[in-house]
Amino acid sequence: MKIVRWSLLLLTTLVAACRHQPKPLSFYYWKTQFTLNDYERSVLKNNGVKSLYVRYFDVDLKPEDNQPSPVSPVHLDTAMQGYRIIPVVFIRNRTFERLQPADIPTLAQHVFALVAQINQSQHIATTEIQFDCDWTERTRDKFFQFIQQYRAITSQTISSTIRLHQIKYKDKTGVPPVDYGVLMYYNMGAISGDNTNSIYERSVASRYNTYIKTYPLPMDVALPIFSWGQTIRNGKVVELLNKTNITQFENDSNFTRLNKTRFITKHACFNGGYYFKEKDEIKLEQVSADDLLDITTQINQNTNHRIGKLIFYDLDSTNLVQYEKDIFKKVLNHFN
Amino acid sequence: MKKIFSKKYLTTLISSFTVGTGIILACAGGDWDDEYGTSNFAPEAFVDSSYRPFFYSGYNFYYGIGYDMQHDSRFNGSNVDDWSLYLGKEAPATEVEFLLKTASASSIDSANRFLAGKVKTLPAALQAFRLFKNASKQTTAFINYLSLAKACEDFATNNFEYAWDYDSKKSKTLTVNTKQVNEVLGKEYNQTKDPFLKQRYWFQLVRSYFYNEPPQTAIDFFERNQQSFPKNELYYRTIAYTAGAYYKLKNYSKANYYYSKVYDGCNALKTVAHYSFHPQEENDWKATLALCANNEEKITLWQMLGVFYSDETRAMKEIYALNPRSEKLNLLLTRAINKEEVRFSGWEPYMGDSKFSIKKDTLKSDLYTLSTRIAQAGNTSEPWMWYMAAGYLDMLTGNTQKAAASYKLAEKKLPKEQLAQAQLRLLKLINTIAGTPKADSKFEKQVLTDLEWITNGTFPPDFRRNTALSWIRETLSKRYKAQKELIKAVCFRDYNEFYASNNNVEAMKSFLNKADKTPYELYYAKLYALTTYDLLEYQAVNLAMEDKLEEAIKKLEGIPAAEHVLPGNPFNGRLQDCHDCDHEAAQKIKYTKLSLLKKMKDMEDKIKTGTEAYSNAMLVANAFYNITHYGNARAFYEGRILGEFHYSPFSIDSLFRGMLTDMKMATKYYTLALAAAKTDEQKAKCHFMLAKCERNQWYNQTFYNNSSNEYGDLQGQAFLPWNGFKSLKQYSNTQFYKEAIKECGYFKSFTEK
């Protein structure tokens, strides 16, 4: 059954490639309240987006708990009707660190039931699911067993995100028993406050590129369009500033610009819901349009044209406005 | 009570695609054993216990409690107390508690109808209740209120029972008609003349409006009536919901202002105010400050900023300028000091815990400048605390004279509390030790009483002494080592190099046995964890490894370790070592450490006289092989100095690794056996055993001698044609040779080359 499904996917990909048709494009939706503003709607329409990967909830096994529980389930609204929705469930790796193997079937059932309940709230049906877990050598067996348990409950297509280190060290971290993987082509550097970009850094990517070709799963690829900041205090990163960009700081007289991507706090203050101490440095990271094209080149060179579709992370007008409107088409055209 | 305003309303979420800041913050803290890590400064000595969750913690979100898990249960106790007081002495507290916490909404409804005369019987569970026998006016009012309050639980409490239920997570469909409930609550509020009941109905209405009506409705109802009520716990519960309503309207300045009132006015809600307080932009913060009616309110806000956003020094500056005598400085100061201690702590591998160190540092931090300034001004409500803090900061950077002066000033104003007294005594002791470069007899006399106290004394709760004790032992050990007073050095902190010299071991034995120890000698002798027996055992192992069996036997005789039974037969010699097989095999004679040595000695005597020289030499060789790390009788050498449970030669202290892995004695006796061997079978066996020794020795000299190989790959090492293998080839006709081919893959591949 699995082989048939893989072959179908491969076939579809091949046929699409032969005809030089543009590949499909999709987005991750990662906020807890699903709602689309006009700008987001227009981007989806202009790029012919049919499917969306929507984060449904996280699963975590908190230190004070004995059993895993869902975290912040999404609140859907009617805006998502009209799109094919692929639920994404993020499972914190520490869940599998402590979860007993005997409790894995229950977790699979809980996840399945909660996805169904969320679907029911908007009267939609989904036929696919994606699991996002930064699994490691230590947790791989339990994560893979979880996927198998999930498969025992439903015949839905199951995919999983794959991080670059999991590609490179596949002998140690294993290959998950899923129908396809989504290669997360970002978050490759350490968040160290140094001068490299932790979202995308070409030199870091090159350490992993050669391993992509031989990874034994059909693959989609996820590309970063988000930006964030880091607060650096006494040389250490002390906070991540989610959805933060340069304009927030360049118009605030409490900050002095050090260079293209860095500011220093002149006077302690609040900005964007965060507090900055005097002398805190802020490093802002984003991926430029040129970087996105460069990433596409890397993928073209290293993947044997085996990538199914591009999925951008994440759909949010605060990210989208950082780029020209035609960026997604440009990237797609550059992609072969 | 439900969490007032959960951050789940924030629409963005950090999860898989970013890295949570919690991780970074947690890692930045360093390694921790205790919750407070490496610390000599107990906030409990300086700060009111209502602030306890906000004391600096190495890794917990809240000090002492970890997390706030009381969202639905925070007021259970005070509810029972309040109602019991209202109902009077006659009301049994257990019944009040049952009605408030356990009874279902429907049974309370039935009781309410019973008291109103609408039904004749009470629900079964309540029939025996004394409260309902000739129920008072208060009881009737209580049950009437409770029937409405239970209805409100539908929207006001979380369903934590079943986390996987989506309905409990989203804005759930309510089973109560909130319009109707609000109407009845409003009617009761207006009608009742009883101030206790009136305030409770007011609370219920504000909360219900917060959940079910536009936020402004809750705000208006609160603001219109708040002057009429006392500032009790219920008042702060009500204002907390009003703060949440302002937050919903994005009026952050007012929301945060109200949260600051909650934080300051109600200890039970301090953590709630903490996770709800959240200025967005600098203007919100400035506007919140502008709302303050007086300096004390501003001080509360600055304390919140300093604690919640980790800017203690800025907050202290602001508060000090507003009111130098404010007690709100205390929490900030202890947090700042505890955080500063992290800069002076590090990992101490020998003790397996973290330790602090005093580092010369001329860079004066903002905290140092500020606390010194405040200490010198002497105008706070607790000057002793500032003297102590300033002194500690001076001491941490090696300025012990200035520190001593500050401690002296602190002493003059020190309160009588035991913890404060112990705190100062500890800091002074550290300072004296840090400030005295030579540990001579004068110094020893000076510190002995305090040393005995810190080591063996009794202490008030929350006193932090472990870091200091560890530092004192380490520091004095090093100082005595530098002064070449090695007995003292090893007593203060045991270290293996000491045992490399037999003279040291002998000196230690004499010291331990010395009858007329001085008080200081008695003190440090007690610090030393080992006994004369441990030293004798260690000497015996050393002698045995050098084949000085007679002397070794003398050391062992009469000490408990002599009777320690070895797990396998130490005279076994295998083609392939298998300790588990030897340990499991049935044994006619069990050997102890002592009986093994005696048996070996007998055999050696026979070798000397030529009695069954081959077999005796073979057995002695096997025994020498087995008492090394490679053999089945490692237990022979395991002890308190040499260590135990060595999973590889790397886990043996490098100082002892050579002795415990050396094959020289095994080789000597296998060689003797070979010389005495008569048959080819015997010779073949000797050659094979010598090959084993040669192989082990090769690993000792090329692999285990370099600790960088510890996490390397043993399999990657070359296989070498051992001399023993080469010699063995000539005995291919023997049975032993065939066995060796079968059992030993290395030998097999060697013969095939």
Image: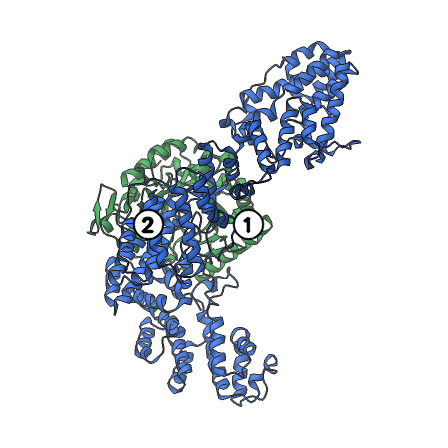
Residue B124 % position (x, y): 61, 81
Disc number placed over residue A258 in the picture, else none: none
Which is nearer the eye, B727 or B570?
B570
Residue B405 is marked as 2
Q: Is residue B584 left or right of residue A251?
A: right
For the residue labelled by badge 1, is the local secondary structure a helix, a strand or a loop? loop
Instruction: Pick the quarter of the image with the N terminus of chain A.
Output: top right
Left or right for B614, reference A106: right
Q: Amino acid at mark 2?
A: Ala
Examine the rendered structure and indicate whether residue B562 appears above or below residue B268: above
Q: Which of labels 2 and 1 is toward the front?
A: 2
Above or below, comparing residue B592 to residue B261 in the picture: above
Q: Does the image show residue B11?
A: no
Query: Chain letter of disc 2?
Result: B
Q: Which chain is blue?
A: B
Mark 2 and mark 1: span between their CA atoms? 56 Å
Q: Which residue is mark 1?
A: A99
The colour one sees for chain A in the rendered image is: green
Image location of residue B334, percent across then percent down: 37, 55
Q: Is residue B134 above or below residue B44?
A: below
Q: Position of residue A275 (x, y in %)?
A: 30, 54
Q: On the picture, is A23 further left or further right than B713?
A: left
